[in-house]
């Protein structure tokens, strides 16, 4: 395995360190092993005992050998601040690290030679034609869904209990959507975690792999906050399907750390920097909201309701709590209370210009009208949700809104219009590469075909829905699909 960090490439097999220009630096094998240990744990402190066990486990040496090797590494990277000593914790590798897969063997290279030769001319022609009109960062832009995971908080005390969801949500709100990708909102990320069987904290590598499987994620971002007040350390990992980058940020002010972290992720998306935090209302910076969400995820809506009401009483502008309370009231079938809270929350979202929450509140308002049996009132409400979502490149709620418009049209007997809306919803899900969304749309198209007595269309659509569910390990979705029949 090769690792790229800063302007250097470290080969774990050859135990070499090279510059990007190909110059090989002089380094002792044991010192290189120590370097590899640090970069494999980039962003995490590695203590002296772990270093001795891993690098010098086959011999008896004094602790001084660790200090000597650390000094050698600092001299090797003399123009950069690469290693930070954390008292009583160990040493942290600071620069971002990218794993590079091993080079192909000569046999593999020969096997691939013909393919490469055949593709070379077409590839050269393609890039020659496209590069003139291509933005500098366009090739590196991430497509599909971006999943920011809850932050693992290792700082004791209640003062930082908000970090798990609050830090995560700040980063999410400050990352722009565009025509190529969508940043999943906090509550939908929690749904993805549940679908992947992953915990809300301490997500492991196997959970990351499952998140890629069950979602349209192209980039999954995990983070961990440690240290102490006024000496914060935020270690992070940027997980792609076949590689990952690790890094660590330090700061005395937690907001400065969050700002820098947001900028780091934004640059991965091809943006120069993240959106300004000036207008961000820290809805998730309230530990009680995290407890309420946990209860909601457990379907314990009765216990979640008073917590959400308490949050709103103390912070009326907490739109996230307002919306989650509305969802909770839906689950409790308290529709009069749903109407009351929507009438309060929608004008507030308009006043605060919170487009993420506004599109969701309009959507819930449309659902309320449908439950009340008023399709004519529901249609303009869902169109409002769609309009706000479109202005914000909110692909998920553009898809949800088109799906709801399709259901209204279907209920009114306008089957061709319903089909058009469903297909448009599928296109929006495809931007996010969301397998659940795509599979659900195919299932809806199957049921629409059944209503029209079109057996072939029913079977084709249902089979496509099942193929997606099977290939992406969507167990619950597949169970539902298996209940559908003609």
Image (cartoon, rainbow, N blue to C red):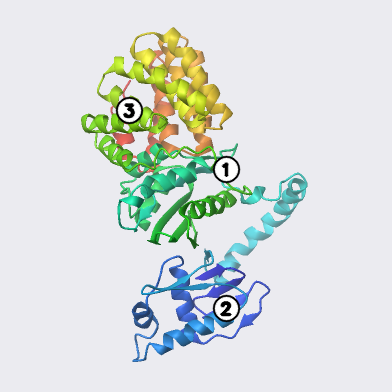
Marked residue nearer the N-terminal end (3 or 1):
1
Q: 10 Å neighbourhood of mark 2: few (<14), some, or many (≥20)?
A: many
Q: Which residue position holds label 3? A: 325
Which of discs 2 and 3 lies nearer the camera? The answer is: 3
Residue drawn at 34 percent across, 58 percent down:
155
Q: Are marks 3 and 1 in contact (CB under 8 Å)?
A: no
Alpha-carbon span between mark 2 and mark 1: 39 Å
CA gap, disc 3 to disc 1? 28 Å
On the image, numbered disc 1 is attached to which residue?
A: 276
Whether residue 338 sits left or right of residue 39 in the image: it is left
**x 30%, y 36%: residue:** 476
Q: Position of residue 175 (x, y in %)?
A: 54, 43
Q: Secondary structure at mark 3?
A: helix
Q: Which mark is residue 17?
A: 2
| Residue 240 in view of the camera | no
Q: Nearer the viewer, mark 3 or mark 1?
A: 1
Answer with left or right where residue 273 lies relative to residue 136. Answer: left
SS assignment at label 2: strand
Dot 3: within a 10 Å radius of its alpha carbon, few (fewer than 14), some, or many (20 or more) residues?
Answer: many
x then y, percent, for residue 11: 53, 75
Q: Is residue 345 above or below residue 464?
A: above
Q: Quadrant of the C terminus?
A: top left
Foreground residue among 182 and 144 = 182
* Spot occupied by residue 405 in the image (x, y as percentages of width and height): 47, 17
């Amino acid at each position: 395995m090769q690792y790229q960090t800063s302007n250097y490439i470290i080969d774990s097999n050859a135990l070499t360190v090279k510059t990007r220009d190909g110059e090989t630096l002089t380094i002792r094998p044991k010192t290189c092993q120590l370097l590899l240990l640090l970069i494999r744990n980039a962003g995490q402190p590695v203590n002296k005992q772990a270093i001795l066990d891993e690098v010098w486990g086959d011999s008896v040496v004094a602790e001084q050998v660790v200090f000597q090797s650390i000094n050698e590494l600092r001299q090797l990277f003399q123009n950069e601040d690469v290693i930070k000593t954390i008292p009583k914790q160990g040493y942290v590798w600071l620069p971002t690290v990218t794993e590079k897969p091993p080079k192909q063997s000569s046999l593999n290279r020969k096997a691939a030679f013909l393919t490469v030769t055949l593709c070379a001319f077409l590839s050269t022609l393609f890039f020659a034609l496209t590069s003139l009109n291509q933005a500098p960062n366009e090739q590196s832009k991430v497509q599909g869904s971006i999943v920011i995971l809850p932050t693992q908080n290792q700082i004791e005390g209640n003062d930082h209990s908000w970090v798990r969801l609050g830090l995560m949500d700040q980063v999410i709100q400050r990352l722009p959507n565009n025509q190529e990708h969508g940043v999943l909102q906090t509550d939908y990320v929690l749904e993805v975690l549940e679908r992947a069987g992953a915990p809300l904290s301490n997500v492991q590598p196997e959970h990351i792999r499952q998140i890629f499987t069950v979602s349209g994620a192209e980039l999954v971002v995990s983070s961990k906050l440690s240290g102490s007040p006024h000496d914060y350390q935020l270690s992070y990992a940027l997980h792609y399907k076949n590689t990952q980058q690790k890094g660590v940020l330090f700061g005395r002010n937690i907001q400065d750390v969050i700002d820098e972290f947001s900028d780091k992720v934004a640059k991965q998306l091809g943006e120069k920097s993240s959106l300004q935090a000036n207008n961000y209302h820290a809805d998730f910076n309230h530990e009680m909201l995290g407890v309420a969400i946990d209860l909601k995820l457990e379907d314990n809506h009765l216990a979640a309701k008073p917590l959400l009401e308490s949050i709103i009483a103390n912070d009326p502008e907490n739109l996230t709590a307002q919306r989650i309370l509305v969802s909770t009231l839906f689950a409790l079938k308290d529709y009069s209370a749903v109407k009351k809270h929507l009438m309060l929350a929608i004008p507030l979202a308009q006043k605060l210009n919170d487009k993420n929450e506004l599109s969701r509140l309009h959507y819930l308002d449309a659902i309320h009208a449908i439950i009340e049996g008023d399709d004519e009132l529901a249609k303009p409400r869902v169109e409002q949700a769609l309009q706000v979502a479109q202005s914000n490149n909110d692909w998920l709620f553009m898809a949800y809104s088109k799906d709801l418009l399709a259901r209204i049209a279907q209920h009114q007997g306008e089957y061709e219009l319903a089909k058009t809306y469903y297909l448009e919803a599928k296109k929006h899900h495809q931007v996010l590469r969301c397998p659940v969304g795509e599979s659900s749309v195919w299932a809806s198209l199957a049921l629409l075909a059944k209503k029209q007595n079109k057996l072939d269309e029913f079977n084709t659509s249902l089979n496509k829905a099942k193929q997606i569910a099977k290939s992406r390990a969507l167990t619950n979705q597949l169970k539902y699909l298996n209940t559908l029949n003609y």
